[in-house]
Image (cartoon, rainbow, N blue to C red):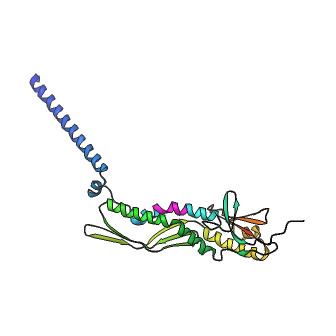
């Protein structure tokens, strides 16, 4: 028995109708997804987006800035604005020990070097800390959270193999019936400035007594350490300390027991 022309047309019409419905549904799905990703608040409301955790947000926001500032401070002898200083390869280097007289041992310019560097790092990131916490607050408010922020003390510590920045800010965020609070944020930077600073302080002790230190004696004891010593024409000595495992570097200047020009 053959199909009648009428029945064929009905069947074809059904297929076209099903195809039309499928196209309409696909268009609606695409439109809804596009709408969700175009409106952040709507995305959050339906669970498509959750804010990054406060700890991760602050770590991500600050770690590159801290790294850059640590590298700058280390390349300048431990100071943001070195004084007294000498220009060396386009860098102003802090004199950690200095005498402007001939035949006189140098005088230590920064007695507590580690503490000084910690304060300099802290000073260099103060504005960035404010910016990052304001950004954190805004990020949570965009996700429909109620927030409050109380600022506290920032502490920077040079520790073995790392630099720890502790920010005692209280951040509270709430949504519906749930409230959470964070009172301490820690940002860790892998850096061996702790050891390099200790070596620098020891070199300065030798500078105050003998007018110089022997790089080889340090490298014999510390296998990971490279110590370079570059005398300058005015009897200044540039020391460059490098951790060979991490490429962390600290450089500074000293002028001690300088000789008067001949004649």
Q: Nearer the viewer, residue 82 or 125?
A: 82
Residue shown at 33% from the left, 67% from the top: 147
Quarter of the image where one finds residue 150:
bottom left
Q: From the viewer's perspective, tell me whether residue 15 is left or right of residue 210.
A: left
Please indicate, yes or no, whether residue 1 appears anywhere in the rendered image.
no
Magenta segment: 60-67
The quarter in which the N terminus is drawn is top left
Q: Main secondary structure of the magenta part?
A: helix
Left or right, residue 220 beside residue 139: right
Residue sitting at 64 percent across and 71 percent down? 197
Q: Position of residue 214 (x, y in %)?
A: 77, 69
Q: Nearer the viewer, residue 54 or 83?
A: 83
Horizontal side, residue 136 vs residue 109: left or right? left
Q: Is residue 200 above or below residue 13?
A: below
Residue 124 visible in image: yes
Q: Front-most of 69 and 220?
A: 69
Is 88 contained in the magenta span?
no
The part of the image, by quadrant, that contains residue 12 is top left
Q: Seen from this angle, which residue lies furthest right?
A: 263
Screen quadrant of the C terminus: bottom right
Vertical comparison of 34 with 227: above or below: above
Give left or right: position of 127 versus 84: left
| Residue at the image position 14 percent from the left and 32 percent from the top | 14
Residue 249 spot, x, y in % from top left: 64, 63
Which percent across, then down, holds residue 21?
A: 18, 38
């Amino acid at each position: 028995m053959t199909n009648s022309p009428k029945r064929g047309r009905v069947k074809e019409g059904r297929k076209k109708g099903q195809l039309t419905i499928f196209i309409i549904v696909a268009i609606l799905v695409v439109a809804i997804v596009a709408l969700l990703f175009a409106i952040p608040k709507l995305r959050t409301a339906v669970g498509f987006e959750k804010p990054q955790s406060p700890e991760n947000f602050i770590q991500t926001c600050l770690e590159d800035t801290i790294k850059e500032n640590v590298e700058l401070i280390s390349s300048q002898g431990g100071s943001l604005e070195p004084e007294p200083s000498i220009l060396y390869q386009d860098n102003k280097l802090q004199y950690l020990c200095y005498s402007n007289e001939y035949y006189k041992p140098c005088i230590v310019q920064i007695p507590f070097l580690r503490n000084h560097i910690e304060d300099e790092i802290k000073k260099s990131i103060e504005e960035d800390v404010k910016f990052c916490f304001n950004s954190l607050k805004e990020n949570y408010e965009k996700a429909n959270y109620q927030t409050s922020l109380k600022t506290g003390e920032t502490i920077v510590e040079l520790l073995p193999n790392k630099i720890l920045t502790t920010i005692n800010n209280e951040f509270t965020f709430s949504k519906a019936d749930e409230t959470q609070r964070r009172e301490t944020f820690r940002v860790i930077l892998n850096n061996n400035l702790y050891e390099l600073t200790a070596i620098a302080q020891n070199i300065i002790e030798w500078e105050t007594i003998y007018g110089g230190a022997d790089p080889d004696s340090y490298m014999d004891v510390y296998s990971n350490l490279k110590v370079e010593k570059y005398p300058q024409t005015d009897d200044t000595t540039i020391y460059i300390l490098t951790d060979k495992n991490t490429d962390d570097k600290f450089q500074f200047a000293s002028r001690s027991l300088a000789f008067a020009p001949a004649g």
